Amino acid sequence: MKYLPTVLISLCLGLFQLQAQDFSIAGKVVDSNDEIIPFANILLLNAADSTFVKGTSANDHGLFVLEAIPPNLYLLQASYIGRGSKPLALDVKADIRLGALVIPKATEDLDEVVVTARRPTVKRLTDRLVFEVENTVVSQGTSWDILRNTPGVILNRDALQIRGNTANVYLNGRRVQLSEQEVKDLLEGLTGSAVKSVEVYTNPPASFDAEEGAVINILTNKNVATGYKGSLEARLTQGVFPKYGFGTSHFLKTDKLNLFANYNYNSRKNNIDVDKGINFINDSGVFSRWSTDENQIKEYDTHSLNLNLDIDADERNELNFSTNILLAPDQIWQRDLFAEIRDPMLRLDSTFTTSNSGAEDKRNLAFDLSWDHKFKKPGAKLKFNGHYTNYFNTYSQNIDSRYFDQNGDFLRNFAFQTEGEQQIDIITAQLDFQTPIGSSSFEAGTKISVINSDSNVDFSNFSDTNEVANPSLSDAFVYEENVYAAYMSYVKSWEKWSVKLGLRGELTDAQGTSLTMNEVNTQDFFEPFPSVYVLYNLNDAHSFSFDYGRNVQRPRYNDLNPFRLFFNENDFLEGNPRLQPNFSNNFNFNYTLNGEFFFDIYYRDNGNYISELVFQDNTALTLRELKQNVLESTSYGLDFTLSKSIADPWFLYSYVSVFHEDETFLAVESEAEQFENAIDGFYIYVANYLTLSKDGSFTGELTFSHFSKYLFGSYVQAPITNLTLGLRKSLWNDRAILSLSAEDLLGEANGRYTSRYLNQDNNFLSVPETQFIRVGFTYNFGNFRLEDNQREIDKKERERINGE
């Protein structure tokens, strides 16, 4: 009996050690043919509520090990490219060595074609349209390909538009603050296989800034398994000149850390040919006809770095640091222009040539820091975000024009030099709170934005004299803007109905000062921005929705600068410090049939829209482009979208829009007479996706688009047509991808712009390199089937930095 206490103590210690011991689970992953599946994701879930416990990935031989597993009841599952094994129930009391987890093949033999991808789907939620593309044939290209094929999105000269509004691009709810060309470069470097879905907001809810207008939000796949993956990508484009790009992405996930890093380098030499005509008019009619041919070559290299770091401090708190760095140093351009001046009878009067050369340096640095806190109440959370952007740009320009008579004899020359500089600093802070209330939810938040912009331009080194360009145009412009915002939103769903109500208020305090002209423009106002969304699902086949939103359009910083940017001394851009914010009201009614046919009727009161207008001065013989608030503007139309698998190897997406656009503005060079520029037009887009090989590794895409005509301020664009072809081949079990695309096969993607009314008669045709062939190659290494947690940087204020 004297040993009994010792025995009891030893037994208790043994039981305690057994209880505290962690175990491991090992196994392999195969398909239904007992073939090894490398790099599959392995998920361990709590058997009680299916919550995530731990994850890993298989190695090259399909083997995996999960370690440090506390004793409990679990579910174990393997997944690979949208397919998964049956959940396996495990009672972990010791180390477990499994035979194999089996992931069945998801293939169907159809006329010698095997299709492994799902079909893309489109669904309408209360406040947005969602285009789901994960593991579909649509996702087999780039993210840019997905975006331009998203329902309701129109691509016009690399500009993404939704119902005539420029679309703002987001990644995972964060704004991509880059120019149109830079956004395209970024998304062409992001593989479409990383995209889960695309959200389209024609009327963004109250949580978005009131200036957002239309929004496209790209949601990437979220990885739950630990591991590392990376990729290398190279692109070669042959248009008039060859262009090339290189990119590399790296992703690392541990139990506490998510890291994404991406670097892209692009080297470009772009060619643009411009044909421009002006008929100058007096009381007797046309008295002088000018025609110009211009060739522009621009060379530049860009370096972009994107970094996203998530740190899970604990189960309720997460920190995030993001940065987006763009460097574009040593950009150079050369514009050579030849002009003929003829009389009304087309007899040659004189000619002139202009050499316009310049250089530019640009940097764009953005930093974000966020803290997310989850409360004990499920669904309740608090988020704080701080942001800083620094934008700096310098440029210099030399213009030299030489004039000749009808016999080619030299008459005179005129030359000058321009140097400019701009720096913009943006600081924002935002706090958001969200909580469920029974079957509904409530969200509220506040935000402050502080923007400071300093810019100057100097004219010097004049040869001869000219009233249009002279030293007095030199100026310095200071712009300061503070915006204070608060919002709240309420969502309620019951039976067949869903309603979302939002209200946002923004107080704007802004002042722009021209130091040389001693002119001050002040904006001090408070405006409410309500939003309403109603969705009614009659049954599985029919649903109806209505939404309304009010938005504001603030002037871009550079549009307010009273500076002139010259193509030559007779043709220039001019800033307008008198621009005012504009408010619009947007109404949409939508009907969905069987989740495949979508009908949308919309009406938009654009208000005093800030439009890009061009005016010819028939006395000074100049052409001036500037932004101006129009007197009124409206848009309305009917959209039809079809998203359907015609046959299993063939998916068809079609978008048709019939629309009306009008703008009424003051014709400042026509005695300030009011003029309405209006058009009725249509747009057709058809995309065909084909699986061309039995194993699904070879796919093709054929797209066709046509614009009847379109409205651009005082111009009307002539009809344009675009036909493109793309091919894609996966190699080495998807470790490498080879792609080939050919754009603008018909050579009809560029239309002439014409402005003809009252005493105005001018037109131009700009032909960039829309016809090209691109070859791309991507190589994936590490566990490349891990899913991205990539994010991008938001902050709508940065979009107003003038891009290319």
Image (spheres, rainbow, N blue to C red):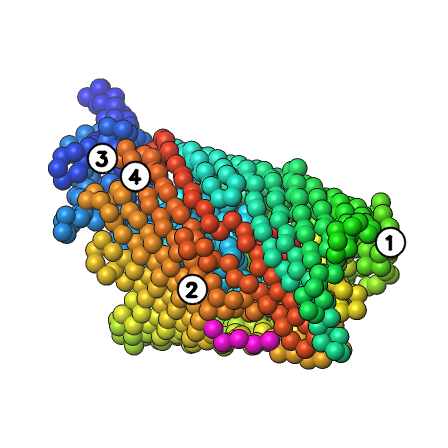
Q: Measured from the top left, where is residue 421 in percent x and y?
A: 75, 46
Give the total of numbered labels: 4
Tell me which residue sits at (35%, 70%) in the image: 598
Number of the label disc, if any, that sits on residue 465: 1
Depicted 444 relative to depicted 244: above or below: below
Residue with the mark numbered 2: 706
Residue with the mark numbered 3: 37
Q: Classify mark 3: helix, strand or loop.
A: loop
- Cβ atoms under marks 2 and 4 closer than 8 Å: no
Residue with the mark numbered 4: 730
Residue 220 lies in the magenta stretch: no
Mark 4 vs mark 3, CA separation in Å: 17 Å
Q: Nearer the viewer, mark 1 or mark 2?
A: 1
Front residue of this view, candidates 100 and 261: 261
Tell me which residue sits at (27%, 35%) in the image: 733
Mark 4 vs mark 1, CA separation in Å: 63 Å
Mark 2 vs mark 3, CA separation in Å: 45 Å
Depicted 439 relative to depicted 78: above or below: below
Q: Classify mark 2: helix, strand or loop.
A: strand
Front residue of this view, candidates 95 and 28: 28
Left/right placement of residue 398 relative to residue 128 reads right
Left/right placement of residue 558 relative to residue 603 reads right
The kind of residue on which mark 1 rests is Thr
Which residues fall within the magenta stretch? 677-681
Tell me which residue sits at (21%, 55%) in the image: 648
